[in-house]
Image: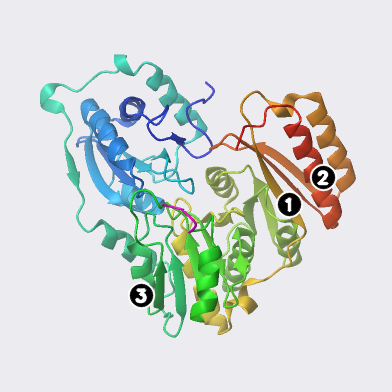
Amino acid sequence: MARTLFGTDGIRGRANAEPMTPATTMAVAMAAGARFRSDHGRRNLVLIGKDTRLSGYMIEPAMVAGFTSIGMDVVLVGPMPTPAVAMLVQSMRADLGVMISASHNPYYDNGIKLFGPDGYKLSDAVEAEIEELVERWQTLPLAASDALGRARRLEDEQGRYIEVVKSTFPRDLRLDGLKVVIDCANGAAYRAAPRVLFELGAEVIPMGVSPDGFNINEACGATAPEAMMARVQAEGADVGIALDGDADRLILADETGHKLDGDQILGLIGGSWLVDGRLSGGGVVATVMSNLGLERYLNGIGLELVRAKVGDRYVLEAMREGGYNVGGEQSGHMILSDHGTTGDGLAAALQVLAAMKRADKPLSQVARVFEPMPQVLRNVRFAGGDPLATDPVKAAIEASKNKLGEAGRLVIRKSGTEPLIRVMAQGDDEGEVVAAVDRVVDAIEQTGTKAAE
Protein backbone atom coordinates (compact mmCIF):
# COMPACT_ATOMS: atom_id res chain seq x y z
CA MET A 1 0.00 0.00 0.00
CA ALA A 2 1.35 3.42 -0.98
CA ARG A 3 1.68 6.05 1.72
CA THR A 4 -0.28 9.27 1.34
CA LEU A 5 -0.50 10.44 4.95
CA PHE A 6 3.19 10.00 5.78
CA GLY A 7 5.93 11.96 4.01
CA THR A 8 9.71 11.70 4.19
CA ASP A 9 9.70 12.56 7.90
CA GLY A 10 6.42 11.41 9.39
CA ILE A 11 3.17 13.32 9.06
CA ARG A 12 3.29 17.08 8.67
CA GLY A 13 0.97 19.95 7.80
CA ARG A 14 -0.68 23.18 8.89
CA ALA A 15 -1.87 22.95 12.49
CA ASN A 16 -5.66 22.52 12.87
CA ALA A 17 -6.01 21.69 9.19
CA GLU A 18 -5.93 18.19 7.76
CA PRO A 19 -4.10 16.05 8.57
CA MET A 20 -2.97 17.90 11.71
CA THR A 21 -6.43 18.12 13.31
CA PRO A 22 -7.44 16.66 16.67
CA ALA A 23 -9.65 14.07 14.98
CA THR A 24 -7.03 12.80 12.57
CA THR A 25 -4.18 12.84 15.08
CA MET A 26 -6.36 10.87 17.49
CA ALA A 27 -7.04 8.37 14.69
CA VAL A 28 -3.31 8.12 14.01
CA ALA A 29 -2.72 7.37 17.70
CA MET A 30 -5.39 4.69 17.71
CA ALA A 31 -3.99 3.13 14.55
CA ALA A 32 -0.38 3.22 15.74
CA GLY A 33 -1.46 1.86 19.11
CA ALA A 34 -3.33 -1.00 17.48
CA ARG A 35 -0.29 -1.79 15.32
CA PHE A 36 2.17 -1.84 18.22
CA ARG A 37 -0.04 -3.19 20.99
CA SER A 38 1.21 -6.58 22.10
CA ASP A 39 0.64 -9.17 24.80
CA HIS A 40 4.04 -9.29 26.47
CA GLY A 41 2.93 -9.70 30.04
CA ARG A 42 2.97 -6.01 31.00
CA ARG A 43 1.07 -2.85 30.22
CA ASN A 44 1.67 -1.46 26.76
CA LEU A 45 3.45 1.89 26.91
CA VAL A 46 3.85 4.82 24.53
CA LEU A 47 6.07 7.83 25.17
CA ILE A 48 5.11 11.24 23.77
CA GLY A 49 7.41 14.25 23.42
CA LYS A 50 6.89 17.53 21.63
CA ASP A 51 8.57 20.79 20.70
CA THR A 52 7.42 24.26 21.77
CA ARG A 53 4.70 25.04 19.20
CA LEU A 54 1.37 26.35 20.43
CA SER A 55 -0.45 23.57 18.58
CA GLY A 56 1.31 20.95 20.65
CA TYR A 57 -1.20 21.70 23.40
CA MET A 58 -3.95 20.59 20.99
CA ILE A 59 -2.30 17.57 19.39
CA GLU A 60 -0.82 16.01 22.53
CA PRO A 61 -4.15 15.44 24.35
CA ALA A 62 -5.78 14.20 21.14
CA MET A 63 -3.10 11.54 20.83
CA VAL A 64 -3.34 10.69 24.53
CA ALA A 65 -7.06 10.04 24.00
CA GLY A 66 -6.33 7.79 21.05
CA PHE A 67 -3.68 5.72 22.77
CA THR A 68 -5.54 5.32 26.06
CA SER A 69 -8.71 4.28 24.22
CA ILE A 70 -6.74 1.41 22.70
CA GLY A 71 -5.48 0.42 26.14
CA MET A 72 -1.96 1.83 26.07
CA ASP A 73 -0.44 3.74 28.97
CA VAL A 74 1.13 7.09 28.04
CA VAL A 75 4.19 8.84 29.45
CA LEU A 76 4.40 12.54 28.60
CA VAL A 77 7.84 14.15 28.55
CA GLY A 78 6.90 17.64 27.35
CA PRO A 79 9.31 19.69 25.21
CA MET A 80 12.24 17.41 24.42
CA PRO A 81 14.55 16.95 21.40
CA THR A 82 13.58 14.26 18.93
CA PRO A 83 16.71 12.20 19.73
CA ALA A 84 15.72 12.29 23.42
CA VAL A 85 12.38 10.66 22.59
CA ALA A 86 14.15 7.94 20.60
CA MET A 87 16.54 7.35 23.49
CA LEU A 88 13.80 7.24 26.13
CA VAL A 89 11.75 4.73 24.11
CA GLN A 90 14.62 2.28 24.42
CA SER A 91 15.52 3.22 27.99
CA MET A 92 11.95 2.81 29.29
CA ARG A 93 11.19 -0.28 27.17
CA ALA A 94 8.24 1.49 25.58
CA ASP A 95 6.30 -0.10 22.74
CA LEU A 96 6.16 3.11 20.73
CA GLY A 97 7.49 6.65 20.74
CA VAL A 98 5.91 9.84 19.37
CA MET A 99 7.52 13.20 18.69
CA ILE A 100 5.05 16.00 17.97
CA SER A 101 7.06 18.42 15.88
CA ALA A 102 7.36 19.97 12.44
CA SER A 103 11.13 20.18 12.91
CA HIS A 104 12.46 23.25 11.06
CA ASN A 105 9.06 24.50 9.82
CA PRO A 106 7.37 27.69 11.17
CA TYR A 107 5.17 27.55 14.28
CA TYR A 108 1.92 27.28 12.30
CA ASP A 109 2.88 23.80 11.07
CA ASN A 110 3.15 20.68 13.15
CA GLY A 111 3.86 17.02 12.63
CA ILE A 112 4.10 13.52 14.07
CA LYS A 113 7.20 11.32 14.04
CA LEU A 114 6.85 7.73 15.21
CA PHE A 115 9.54 5.48 16.69
CA GLY A 116 9.35 1.73 17.17
CA PRO A 117 10.37 -0.04 20.39
CA ASP A 118 13.95 -0.21 19.09
CA GLY A 119 14.14 3.60 18.98
CA TYR A 120 14.28 3.75 15.18
CA LYS A 121 11.87 5.62 12.93
CA LEU A 122 9.32 3.39 11.27
CA SER A 123 9.88 1.88 7.84
CA ASP A 124 7.78 2.81 4.81
CA ALA A 125 6.05 -0.57 5.08
CA VAL A 126 4.99 -0.08 8.70
CA GLU A 127 3.83 3.47 8.00
CA ALA A 128 1.69 2.08 5.18
CA GLU A 129 0.16 -0.43 7.61
CA ILE A 130 -0.70 2.40 10.01
CA GLU A 131 -2.27 4.41 7.19
CA GLU A 132 -4.50 1.47 6.36
CA LEU A 133 -5.61 1.31 9.99
CA VAL A 134 -6.25 5.07 10.05
CA GLU A 135 -8.64 4.63 7.13
CA ARG A 136 -10.80 2.34 9.29
CA TRP A 137 -10.06 3.78 12.73
CA GLN A 138 -13.73 3.60 13.74
CA THR A 139 -13.62 -0.19 13.48
CA LEU A 140 -10.51 -0.65 15.63
CA PRO A 141 -11.14 -2.67 18.80
CA LEU A 142 -11.34 -0.42 21.84
CA ALA A 143 -10.17 -1.37 25.30
CA ALA A 144 -12.73 -2.42 27.86
CA SER A 145 -13.73 0.20 30.42
CA ASP A 146 -11.49 -1.36 33.05
CA ALA A 147 -8.54 -1.71 30.65
CA LEU A 148 -8.22 1.88 29.47
CA GLY A 149 -4.74 3.36 29.49
CA ARG A 150 -3.46 5.93 31.97
CA ALA A 151 -1.32 9.01 31.30
CA ARG A 152 1.42 10.43 33.51
CA ARG A 153 4.29 12.88 33.21
CA LEU A 154 7.90 11.73 33.47
CA GLU A 155 10.03 13.26 36.19
CA ASP A 156 13.58 14.47 35.39
CA GLU A 157 13.21 13.79 31.69
CA GLN A 158 15.74 16.52 30.94
CA GLY A 159 18.32 15.00 33.25
CA ARG A 160 18.05 11.59 31.59
CA TYR A 161 18.80 12.99 28.15
CA ILE A 162 21.50 15.35 29.39
CA GLU A 163 23.49 12.52 30.95
CA VAL A 164 23.21 10.39 27.80
CA VAL A 165 24.42 13.23 25.56
CA LYS A 166 27.29 14.07 27.89
CA SER A 167 28.38 10.42 27.76
CA THR A 168 29.01 10.77 24.00
CA PHE A 169 31.82 13.26 24.73
CA PRO A 170 35.27 11.72 25.39
CA ARG A 171 35.81 11.22 29.11
CA ASP A 172 39.38 12.50 28.95
CA LEU A 173 38.35 15.88 27.53
CA ARG A 174 36.64 19.01 28.85
CA LEU A 175 35.34 22.16 27.20
CA ASP A 176 37.10 24.45 29.64
CA GLY A 177 38.41 27.56 27.88
CA LEU A 178 35.89 27.42 25.02
CA LYS A 179 33.31 30.16 24.60
CA VAL A 180 30.31 28.66 22.80
CA VAL A 181 27.25 30.38 21.33
CA ILE A 182 24.31 27.97 21.28
CA ASP A 183 21.13 28.88 19.38
CA CYS A 184 18.29 26.55 20.37
CA ALA A 185 15.77 27.97 17.85
CA ASN A 186 13.28 28.58 20.69
CA GLY A 187 12.64 24.90 20.29
CA ALA A 188 12.79 21.56 22.04
CA ALA A 189 16.41 21.79 23.25
CA TYR A 190 16.12 25.21 24.88
CA ARG A 191 16.76 23.77 28.33
CA ALA A 192 18.97 20.74 27.67
CA ALA A 193 21.55 22.08 25.19
CA PRO A 194 22.95 25.02 27.20
CA ARG A 195 23.08 22.83 30.30
CA VAL A 196 25.06 20.08 28.55
CA LEU A 197 27.67 22.55 27.31
CA PHE A 198 27.92 24.24 30.70
CA GLU A 199 28.33 20.96 32.56
CA LEU A 200 31.14 19.96 30.19
CA GLY A 201 33.01 23.15 31.08
CA ALA A 202 32.22 25.64 28.33
CA GLU A 203 31.40 29.31 28.74
CA VAL A 204 27.91 29.32 27.27
CA ILE A 205 26.15 32.16 25.46
CA PRO A 206 22.55 30.95 24.90
CA MET A 207 20.22 32.20 22.18
CA GLY A 208 16.72 31.12 21.19
CA VAL A 209 15.87 29.92 24.70
CA SER A 210 12.64 31.89 25.26
CA PRO A 211 9.90 29.95 23.45
CA ASP A 212 6.42 31.47 23.43
CA GLY A 213 4.62 29.01 21.16
CA PHE A 214 5.06 31.21 18.09
CA ASN A 215 8.79 31.97 17.76
CA ILE A 216 10.18 28.50 17.10
CA ASN A 217 12.63 28.71 14.15
CA GLU A 218 11.73 32.37 13.65
CA ALA A 219 14.88 34.13 12.40
CA CYS A 220 16.93 31.72 14.49
CA GLY A 221 18.22 28.17 14.62
CA ALA A 222 19.75 25.93 11.97
CA THR A 223 17.55 27.25 9.15
CA ALA A 224 18.39 30.90 9.94
CA PRO A 225 21.88 30.81 11.47
CA GLU A 226 22.84 34.39 10.58
CA ALA A 227 22.02 35.73 14.06
CA MET A 228 24.16 33.02 15.63
CA MET A 229 27.02 33.73 13.23
CA ALA A 230 26.90 37.45 14.05
CA ARG A 231 26.78 36.71 17.78
CA VAL A 232 29.93 34.58 17.50
CA GLN A 233 31.79 37.53 16.04
CA ALA A 234 30.32 40.05 18.50
CA GLU A 235 31.17 37.91 21.54
CA GLY A 236 34.56 36.74 20.30
CA ALA A 237 33.34 33.16 20.72
CA ASP A 238 35.27 30.08 19.62
CA VAL A 239 32.32 28.35 17.99
CA GLY A 240 28.63 28.77 17.28
CA ILE A 241 26.05 26.00 17.29
CA ALA A 242 22.56 26.37 15.80
CA LEU A 243 19.98 23.62 16.31
CA ASP A 244 16.56 23.41 14.68
CA GLY A 245 13.17 23.23 16.36
CA ASP A 246 13.41 19.60 17.42
CA ALA A 247 17.24 19.57 17.68
CA ASP A 248 17.92 16.73 15.27
CA ARG A 249 20.03 18.93 12.97
CA LEU A 250 22.69 21.58 13.39
CA ILE A 251 24.70 24.23 11.60
CA LEU A 252 28.03 25.49 12.97
CA ALA A 253 30.02 28.70 12.76
CA ASP A 254 33.76 28.96 13.33
CA GLU A 255 35.42 31.74 15.34
CA THR A 256 35.28 34.09 12.33
CA GLY A 257 31.51 33.66 12.00
CA HIS A 258 31.91 31.53 8.87
CA LYS A 259 29.09 29.02 8.37
CA LEU A 260 29.80 25.28 8.27
CA ASP A 261 27.01 23.10 6.87
CA GLY A 262 26.28 19.40 7.25
CA ASP A 263 28.72 18.34 4.53
CA GLN A 264 31.64 20.04 6.29
CA ILE A 265 30.57 18.48 9.59
CA LEU A 266 30.31 15.04 7.98
CA GLY A 267 33.77 15.40 6.48
CA LEU A 268 35.25 16.48 9.81
CA ILE A 269 33.64 13.73 11.89
CA GLY A 270 34.29 11.05 9.27
CA GLY A 271 37.97 11.99 8.99
CA SER A 272 38.36 12.35 12.76
CA TRP A 273 36.79 8.97 13.47
CA LEU A 274 38.93 7.37 10.78
CA VAL A 275 42.09 8.61 12.52
CA ASP A 276 40.76 7.45 15.89
CA GLY A 277 39.94 4.00 14.52
CA ARG A 278 36.24 4.45 15.28
CA LEU A 279 34.84 4.66 11.74
CA SER A 280 32.88 1.64 10.56
CA GLY A 281 32.10 0.51 7.03
CA GLY A 282 34.96 2.29 5.27
CA GLY A 283 32.90 5.33 4.42
CA VAL A 284 30.22 7.89 5.24
CA VAL A 285 26.56 8.01 4.19
CA ALA A 286 25.12 11.26 2.82
CA THR A 287 22.38 12.10 0.31
CA VAL A 288 22.06 13.00 -3.34
CA MET A 289 22.15 16.66 -2.26
CA SER A 290 25.62 16.53 -0.69
CA ASN A 291 28.43 18.49 -2.30
CA LEU A 292 30.79 16.82 -4.74
CA GLY A 293 33.64 18.39 -2.79
CA LEU A 294 32.78 16.13 0.15
CA GLU A 295 32.84 13.08 -2.10
CA ARG A 296 36.22 14.00 -3.54
CA TYR A 297 37.66 14.69 -0.08
CA LEU A 298 36.49 11.37 1.31
CA ASN A 299 37.77 9.48 -1.73
CA GLY A 300 41.11 11.22 -1.24
CA ILE A 301 41.49 9.77 2.27
CA GLY A 302 40.40 6.32 1.18
CA LEU A 303 36.73 6.53 2.16
CA GLU A 304 33.56 5.95 0.19
CA LEU A 305 30.63 8.36 0.05
CA VAL A 306 27.37 6.44 -0.10
CA ARG A 307 24.45 8.54 -1.34
CA ALA A 308 20.94 7.85 -0.06
CA LYS A 309 17.60 9.45 -0.81
CA VAL A 310 16.90 12.73 0.96
CA GLY A 311 15.57 12.14 4.47
CA ASP A 312 17.47 11.17 7.58
CA ARG A 313 15.69 7.82 7.88
CA TYR A 314 16.87 6.85 4.40
CA VAL A 315 20.39 7.80 5.44
CA LEU A 316 19.99 5.59 8.49
CA GLU A 317 18.66 2.69 6.40
CA ALA A 318 21.77 2.87 4.21
CA MET A 319 23.97 3.05 7.31
CA ARG A 320 22.39 -0.06 8.81
CA GLU A 321 22.55 -1.98 5.55
CA GLY A 322 26.23 -1.17 4.96
CA GLY A 323 27.51 -1.19 8.53
CA TYR A 324 28.35 2.54 8.57
CA ASN A 325 28.29 4.55 11.80
CA VAL A 326 28.52 8.12 10.43
CA GLY A 327 25.89 9.63 8.18
CA GLY A 328 23.95 12.80 7.60
CA GLU A 329 22.60 15.47 5.31
CA GLN A 330 23.88 18.77 4.03
CA SER A 331 20.98 20.42 5.86
CA GLY A 332 22.56 19.41 9.16
CA HIS A 333 20.99 16.11 10.15
CA MET A 334 23.81 14.09 11.69
CA ILE A 335 23.39 10.43 12.62
CA LEU A 336 26.10 8.82 14.71
CA SER A 337 24.82 5.30 15.25
CA ASP A 338 27.33 4.61 18.01
CA HIS A 339 25.45 7.18 20.06
CA GLY A 340 21.83 7.08 18.92
CA THR A 341 19.17 5.79 16.57
CA THR A 342 18.27 9.09 14.90
CA GLY A 343 19.75 12.49 14.13
CA ASP A 344 21.09 14.38 17.15
CA GLY A 345 22.43 17.87 16.52
CA LEU A 346 23.86 18.31 20.00
CA ALA A 347 25.68 14.96 20.07
CA ALA A 348 27.19 15.72 16.66
CA ALA A 349 28.28 19.18 17.82
CA LEU A 350 30.09 17.58 20.76
CA GLN A 351 32.09 15.41 18.36
CA VAL A 352 33.23 18.55 16.53
CA LEU A 353 34.17 20.21 19.81
CA ALA A 354 36.12 17.09 20.79
CA ALA A 355 38.07 17.25 17.52
CA MET A 356 38.87 20.91 18.23
CA LYS A 357 40.13 20.12 21.72
CA ARG A 358 42.25 17.18 20.56
CA ALA A 359 43.85 19.24 17.78
CA ASP A 360 44.16 22.31 20.03
CA LYS A 361 43.33 24.44 17.01
CA PRO A 362 40.51 26.88 16.17
CA LEU A 363 37.49 25.50 14.34
CA SER A 364 38.41 27.39 11.16
CA GLN A 365 41.53 25.22 10.88
CA VAL A 366 39.90 21.98 11.97
CA ALA A 367 36.56 21.95 10.19
CA ARG A 368 37.13 23.23 6.66
CA VAL A 369 38.45 19.92 5.39
CA PHE A 370 37.45 20.52 1.75
CA GLU A 371 36.55 23.39 -0.56
CA PRO A 372 32.91 23.03 -1.65
CA MET A 373 32.29 22.89 -5.38
CA PRO A 374 29.89 25.44 -6.87
CA GLN A 375 26.37 24.40 -5.85
CA VAL A 376 23.02 26.15 -6.27
CA LEU A 377 19.67 25.18 -4.76
CA ARG A 378 16.38 26.90 -5.57
CA ASN A 379 12.90 26.05 -4.34
CA VAL A 380 9.77 26.52 -6.42
CA ARG A 381 6.43 26.48 -4.63
CA PHE A 382 3.64 24.95 -6.68
CA ALA A 383 -0.14 25.00 -6.32
CA GLY A 384 -1.02 21.62 -7.77
CA GLY A 385 -0.51 19.19 -10.58
CA ASP A 386 2.85 17.70 -11.47
CA PRO A 387 5.10 20.24 -13.21
CA LEU A 388 7.86 17.64 -13.54
CA ALA A 389 5.66 15.57 -15.87
CA THR A 390 5.32 18.31 -18.50
CA ASP A 391 7.32 18.18 -21.72
CA PRO A 392 8.92 21.67 -21.38
CA VAL A 393 10.22 20.83 -17.89
CA LYS A 394 11.49 17.44 -19.04
CA ALA A 395 13.31 19.13 -21.93
CA ALA A 396 14.86 21.73 -19.60
CA ILE A 397 16.06 19.00 -17.25
CA GLU A 398 17.68 17.08 -20.10
CA ALA A 399 19.35 20.22 -21.45
CA SER A 400 20.75 21.11 -18.04
CA LYS A 401 22.13 17.61 -17.53
CA ASN A 402 23.87 17.76 -20.88
CA LYS A 403 25.40 21.16 -20.11
CA LEU A 404 26.73 20.03 -16.72
CA GLY A 405 28.30 16.93 -18.22
CA GLU A 406 29.67 13.90 -16.43
CA ALA A 407 31.44 15.96 -13.73
CA GLY A 408 28.27 17.74 -12.62
CA ARG A 409 25.10 16.72 -10.85
CA LEU A 410 21.48 17.82 -11.24
CA VAL A 411 18.97 16.75 -8.58
CA ILE A 412 15.29 17.63 -8.79
CA ARG A 413 12.86 16.42 -6.16
CA LYS A 414 9.56 17.27 -4.58
CA SER A 415 9.77 18.11 -0.90
CA GLY A 416 8.23 15.50 1.35
CA THR A 417 7.13 18.10 3.90
CA GLU A 418 6.06 21.16 1.86
CA PRO A 419 4.54 21.86 -1.63
CA LEU A 420 7.97 22.66 -3.06
CA ILE A 421 10.11 21.40 -5.89
CA ARG A 422 13.80 21.60 -5.03
CA VAL A 423 16.19 22.11 -7.93
CA MET A 424 19.89 21.61 -7.15
CA ALA A 425 22.91 21.58 -9.43
CA GLN A 426 26.63 21.39 -8.79
CA GLY A 427 29.74 21.20 -10.89
CA ASP A 428 33.15 22.73 -11.56
CA ASP A 429 31.85 25.74 -13.54
CA GLU A 430 29.76 28.09 -11.39
CA GLY A 431 28.20 29.80 -14.39
CA GLU A 432 26.99 26.51 -15.84
CA VAL A 433 25.63 25.49 -12.43
CA VAL A 434 23.58 28.69 -12.08
CA ALA A 435 22.33 28.43 -15.65
CA ALA A 436 21.32 24.80 -15.19
CA VAL A 437 19.16 25.61 -12.16
CA ASP A 438 17.65 28.73 -13.72
CA ARG A 439 16.72 26.80 -16.87
CA VAL A 440 14.73 24.20 -14.92
CA VAL A 441 13.16 26.68 -12.49
CA ASP A 442 12.02 28.93 -15.36
CA ALA A 443 10.43 25.95 -17.10
CA ILE A 444 8.58 24.92 -13.93
CA GLU A 445 7.29 28.45 -13.33
CA GLN A 446 6.06 28.70 -16.92
CA THR A 447 3.82 25.64 -16.46
CA GLY A 448 1.41 27.83 -14.51
CA THR A 449 1.53 25.64 -11.41
CA LYS A 450 3.61 28.07 -9.34
CA ALA A 451 1.73 29.07 -6.21
CA ALA A 452 1.33 32.68 -5.18
CA GLU A 453 3.80 33.69 -2.48
The image quarter containing residue 167 is bottom left
254 and 292: which one is in front?
Answer: 254
Looking at the rendered structure, the secondary structure element under dot 2 is helix
**Which amino acid, by three-letter code, is at mark 1?**
Val
377 on left or right of 210: right
346 and 385: which one is in front?
Answer: 385
Q: Earlier in the sequence, mark 3 or mark 1?
A: 3
Most common secondary structure along the magenta stretch: loop
Crowding at dot 3, Cα within 10 Å, few <14 / some 14-19 / many 20+, comes out as some
Please provide the residue range marked out in magenta. Answer: 216-220
Crowding at dot 2, Cα within 10 Å, few <14 / some 14-19 / many 20+, comes out as many
Residue that carries the numbered disc 1 in the rendered image: 376
Q: Earlier in the sequence, mark 3 or mark 2?
A: 3
Against 150, is 83 above or below?
below
State the CA–CA distance, disc 3 to disc 2.
46 Å
**Which amino acid, by three-letter code, is at mark 2?**
Ala
